[in-house]
Amino acid sequence: MKQTAVDWLFEQLWEKSKDKFEWNSVLKQAKEYEKKQVKHAFEIGFICNSLGWDFIKVFNKYFKQNYK
C-alpha cells in the first residue's frame, strides 16, 4: 500500500526529536512529496479528460486500491 504525503510526514515526525530545524526539513520534504502526488493526479485527470472518462470514478477506484 502506498503512503500519502500526510502519512509519510507523520511517520517522519514521530521518529524525530522535537527540534524545529529537523521538523522544518521534514516538512519541506513532505511538501515535495505532496507536489509529486498532486502532479500525478493532475496528469491522470488530464488523460481521463482526453479520453472522455469520468475522472472521479477513476480516482476513487485508484485511491481505494492504493491508499485504503
Image (spheres, rainbow, N blue to C red):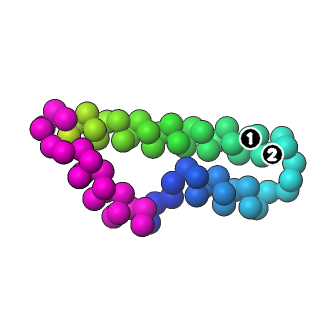
- Please tell me whether residue 51 belongs to the stretch shown in magenta: yes
Residue 48 at x, y percent in the picture: 20, 40
Q: Is residue 23 left or right of residue 40?
A: right
**Residue found at x 79% / y 57%:** 16
Given the current orientation, which residue lies at the most extreme left position? 52
Quick check: 48 above or below 64? Answer: above
The C terminus - image quarter: bottom left
Q: Nearer the viewer, residue 57 or 9?
A: 57
Residue 20 at x, y percent in the picture: 85, 43
Q: Secondary structure at mark 1?
A: helix
**Residue that label 1 marks:** 25
**Residue found at x 67% / y 38%:** 28
**Residue that label 2 marks:** 22
- For residue 16, the mark is none
**Amino acid type, residue under disc 1 in the picture:** Ser
Q: Secondary structure at mark 2?
A: helix
Report the span colored magenta.
Answer: 49-68
Residue 51 falls in which quadrant of the image?
top left
Quick check: 2 above or below 56? Answer: below
Density class for disc 2 (Cα within 10 Å; few <14, some 14-19, many ≥20) is some
Q: Main secondary structure of the magenta part?
A: helix
Disc 1/disc 2 C-alpha distance (Å): 5 Å
Q: Is residue 23 left or right of residue 9?
A: right
